[in-house]
Amino acid sequence: MRFRLLGALEVNRDGTSFDVPRPRLRAALAFLLLNADRPVGAERLVDALWGEHPPRTARNQVHTVVSTLRQALPPEAAELLRSDPAGYRLAVDPDSVDVRQFAREVAAARALAADGAPAEAARALRTALDLWRGEALAGIDAPFAGPVRTRLAEERFAALELLADTELAAGRHHPLVPELTALLREFPDREGIAARLATALHRSGRPADALTVLRDTRTLLADEYGLDPGRALLDAEAAVLRGESAAEGPGPAGTAVPVPPAPAGAAEPPASAGPASAGAAPAGAAPVGAAPAGPVTPPTAPAPEPSPYPRPAQLPQAPHGFVGRRAELDRLGGLAAGTAAGAGPTGAPGDNGPRTAVVVGPAGIGKTAFAVRWAHCATAVGAFPDGQLFVDLHGYDANERETAPRVLERFLLALGVPGHRIPEDPVLREDLYRSTVAGRRLLVVLDNAQDYEQVRPLLPGTAESFTLVTSRGRLGRLVVQTGAVPLRLGVLPPAEAVAVLAELAGPELVRAAPGAAAELADLCGGLPLALRISAVRLIEEPELPIGELAGELAPEQDRLAGLGLFGDDLTVSGALSHSYRRLAPEQARLFRLVSLHPGAAVPAGAAAALLEPPDAPLSAWTPAPARRLLRTLEDVHLLERSAADPGRYGMHDLVRLYGRQLAAAAGTDCSTEAGAEAAVALDRLAEWYVAHADAAYRILDPKRLRPPTELRLGWSGPEPFADSDEAQQWFVQESDNLLALTRLGVAHGKHRAVWQLALLHFTHLMRSHRLGLLAEVQRLGEEAALAVGHRLAAATLANNRGIAYAIRRDRAAAGHLERAIAGYEEIGEHGGAARARLNLGSMHYEFRELDRAAHYQEGAVATARATGDDALLYPSLQNLALVRNEQGRHPDARDLLDEALAVSERVGTEHAIADSREKLAWVLQRLGEHQRAFELSEASLAVARRFGDLLMVGRAIDQMGMARISQGRSAEAREYWEEAIRVFAGIGSVEAETVRLRMAEHFS
């Protein structure tokens, strides 16, 4: 078996490729292959597939993905996908994966080159590069894929550069020219390729062409990126101009040496992989600027020579109570270590590596405290011997916003330039600043920047200095123009948030009431500013217990008011207002309206629907103007795009409360007379969700009897979902939003929306086995339907409530089902009444009251046959068969299920067919037909997973275990049963205990 990742994912056996269906299965397989023959824990796999925002059921979905992947792989590969205590292991030979083969060939080439065998090294490199068939991990869309793809692309490029060096060393410069020319045409900004092409041209007797290549590259770098040429270009140009021997002149400086790939998901290659990159921390030392574990100890290296220049020290006082951020501090230290000594990523002195880092995040996230903390740590270990410059640019305060000329004057004075030598002309002042800092190892901190134009004049021009920028905006132009490395700060995790309270307000206070402290930290949403304000309140108001402060902040309407200090302008609202005041009117309107969305994650399409006129038709598309507005709110961190799904946006709880406060102040609160804008927006939001839920429901459960959906608005464009996979995924993503919107509709008396949302939510909640929520939602829907006199909807929702209680084996189901029967009969809906009676029989079956169950189910079968209602007939036959099976009448049960399967195949859905097969498999176990039972269960399992029917998933896996134990395949049976227990336990089903007892019977 061969596995190929350097291009599109391929599984190849004896020249035959096997297709792995579905994107998530391909992503999981790719991640396991990148970690070939190493255990991958479930949490790592969750992070790899969903990133920072996994769904609630992620762990269960991982088990499902792995099990489905086993079925999709060829048998010999499926057997190697194993579960062990450390997680999942794909026990394939690592050398069967082309990524590992590539690394091995490159490492061999590097060794050959070091041994003076360039021709052999070149052959090994060409073997390695021939493994590439296109972009690595092509078509893999998962959070882990981007960083791995980037790393592999850099390793390929390093191999290409090493190939050029070995070919040059072997004297094969003539055939190298066309190869490098094509490569430079594809990657015109790669200085290393340009330098090597120039060397090859020069050695081929074409110095003029060599200079043209070098100067074209220099012009491109200056015009497109504002960059000066690096050492490799300068050295190559100097060699040509000096007329060095074409045959023996030096190759380009800074030859790249690739390192073996790190394990997937690792931030850096292992230290033992090869020569350390320039600027890396020495063995045993933390990266420069990382938060020290104990007191900072200055390095023991000889002290630097005294600087002949003034040494500015403008950093403000280090923040008190700083907690956490270790990973971010370490990363920033690593970035600075690669530049503070004037070394770039290739290790060549003066090479242009990243000279700027930009720390971004929303208001109140602690960007300034983080930057100042790191700067003090870096200074303490002597990283910047020529001093530190610091300025608060007040980028989001129109009254105090700093201008570049004013800041440059302060910086120049601090650097020892006499005032009379500082020119008035801003451009000349900028030139003098860059000349003054050239050659100095300075740290420049530009705090609270608004945009690139405010920052650009303050950036040093050489690599000896390191610049740290903080901003609420993403400063994408700064990243593009200068190669600045963005570093995003998020909210603090719960433990670190509580630690902030303990550091500032005192550990005794937190130890005395740990539960209240955790609640207070949660109400602050992990936002450092809110935590600091709360701690100050606890200090200044000693009579205020921590639990009482948490109680004061608990009501949403009081929370922002409580997160401020008397007599001080330090408030969460004030910090957010600086961002809000910079918005254009349409951006501000969208922010206010999106804050009214009751869910945690807002789909872009739903946000766009809020902006449209009241009677505009709904659509599955997000118009370009709405996308642009969403991006502007994301840029200033008032919205955060989901890492797992770029089409969804989240809001910090306090940001959402601030937006709702603004909506009320603008007269858009639904509770006021002037609430037209918000009322219209919420009506459109409900219509958008009803329309999408209806479209998904029609795909996933088209045969279920229900009232027609009532939409006030029209629909424009194609249907929102192409197939059942898309429809199911929409319900998975939007289920919590549907629940929140249903509750909001109840609060605002939106009865028509409530009963429709509840009814359309039924199938997803039932299949995902969220029975408590199912019962609650159907109750809210029934009450809303009764409020508007919709008797068919009320009866349908009462029937649904009965189903929820029956699955839970709760006798309260009978009252709901009898109420549904009466409601259906009153309006002459006899098919609905027959279905409710069938469900009443199912309740009796759950309590093993078999005669009463058979009475209702026989009646349902008779009604279905008499009326020709095949959609009622196959579930009636299924349920009656289960009763006959428990009565010991197994052949009768099989006959009934054979008929049910035939009917469902004729008129049912794919899910109904799978349901019939799963029940038939249950009966066949009793009849000793174990292999056919296994095959039917396996077929049902695949469909159940696609439709998210977790109860059927668990039952199918359980039955596969039963079949295997009967066939004497105990190890397989144990694995199936263990997985069934995980599935049942994950949904809170009592059937988990049934499987445990079955396992104990066979393996005790």
Image (cartoon, grey):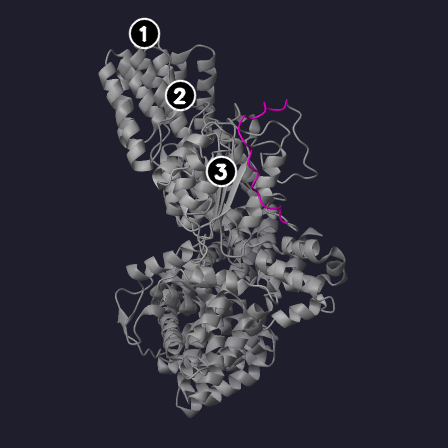
| Residue 802, position as x, y percentages in the image | 53, 79
| Residue type at tag 2 | Leu
Magenta stretch in the rendered image:
302-319
* Residue designated by label 3: 413
Q: Which residue is more in the foreground, 251 or 434?
A: 434
At a point 44% along the width and 10% down the height, the residue shown is 116
- State the CA–CA distance, disc 3 to disc 1: 49 Å
- Residue 316 in magenta stretch: yes
Kind of element beneath mark 2: helix
Kind of element beneath mark 3: helix
- Residue 19 in magenta stretch: no
Label drawn at residue 162: 2
Q: Which residue is more in the foreground, 832 or 904?
A: 832
| Residue type at tag 1 | Ser
Circles 3 and 1: CB distance less than 8 Å? no
| Residue 330, position as x, y percentages in the image | 57, 39
Give the vertical position of 357 relative to 613 (above or below). above
Q: Is residue 77 visible?
A: no
Give the vertical position of 786 relative to 630 (above or below). below
The number of numbered discs placed on residues in the rendered structure image is 3
At a point 67% along the width and 25% down the height, the residue shown is 300
